[in-house]
Image: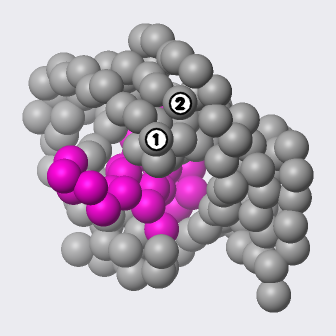
């Protein structure tokens, strides 16, 4: 595993739509492993999408520190959402900024794992927020595009 460089706001790759994954090979596994290591190494990161490391593929990893542990999402599709919550968010690609964003309180998502097997997950709370945040990255959307209230961090 290796650390990947995190792309920051201003880099055009963050604004592009990622392409679907069609190959489930060693290269994909290396990317997933590297993303998980990079997310954890960079501090309090709880999610990281492939565009954030310069790879335009529909892949992200999430670990919010709950019973689910690390979850890898490939070609995710949000199937349903319920409720609404105002969540304070930050982003490894937008250092020094945070803001409140309206997100679904609960959701159901379908994705593939690294073996190409389909799974579905019902998420709520911080996990639902994180899935939405990372899924937005796959479409070139940043949390700062949706922020209701914003703060500058020192």
Name the residue located 60 percent from the left edge and 67 percent from the top edge: 92
**25 up-or-down from 54: above or below:** above
Q: Which residue range is magenta in the image?
A: 45-69
**Image x and y of residue 70, in percent:** 24, 55
Q: Is residue 56 left or right of residue 20?
A: right
Discs 2, 1 touching: Cβ within 8 Å: yes
**Residue located farthest toward the top when viewing the structure as drawn:** 79
**Image x and y of residue 81, in percent:** 51, 17
Work out whether residue 75 can be spotted: no
Q: Secondary structure at mark 2?
A: loop
Q: Earlier in the sequence, mark 2 or mark 1?
A: 2
Q: Is residue 147 left or right of residue 1?
A: right
**Residue located farthest toward the bottom when viewing the structure as drawn:** 154
Name the residue located 69 percent from the left edge and 41 percent from the top edge: 86
State the CA–CA distance, disc 2 to disc 1.
6 Å
Q: Is residue 111 left or right of residue 52?
A: left
**Image x and y of residue 59, in percent:** 40, 41
Name the residue carrying label 2: 105
Please, which colouring scheme is shown?
one colour
Q: Quadrant of the C terminus?
A: bottom right
Q: How many marks?
A: 2
**151 up-or-down from 147: above or below:** below
Name the residue located 46 percent from the left edge and 41 percent from the top edge: 125
Does residue 66 show up magenta in the picture? yes
Q: Quadrant of the N terminus?
A: bottom left
Q: Is residue 27 left or right of residue 100?
A: left
**Image x and y of residue 97, in percent:** 79, 68
The crowd level at tag 1 (other Cα within 10 Å; few <14, some 14-19, many 20+) is: some
**87 up-or-down from 64: above or below:** above
Name the residue carrying label 1: 125
| Dot label at residue 70 | none
């Amino acid at each position: 595993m290796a650390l990947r460089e995190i792309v920051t706001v201003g880099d055009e790759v963050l604004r592009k739509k990622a392409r679907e994954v069609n190959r489930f090979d060693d290269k994909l596994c290396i990317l997933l492993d590297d993303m998980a290591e990079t997310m954890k190494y960079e501090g309090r990161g709880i999610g990281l999408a492939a565009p954030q490391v310069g790879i335009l593929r529909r892949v992200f990893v999430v670990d919010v520190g709950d019973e689910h542990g690390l979850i890898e999402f490939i070609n995710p599709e949000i199937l349903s959402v319920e409720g609404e919550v105002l969540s304070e968010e930050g982003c490894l690609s937008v250092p020094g900024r945070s803001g409140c964003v309206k997100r679904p309180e609960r959701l159901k998502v379908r994705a593939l794992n690294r073996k190409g097997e389909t799974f579905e997950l019902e998420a709520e709370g911080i996990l639902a927020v994180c899935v939405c945040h990372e899924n937005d990255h796959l479409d070139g959307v940043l949390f700062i595009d949706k922020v209701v209230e914003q703060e500058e961090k020192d």
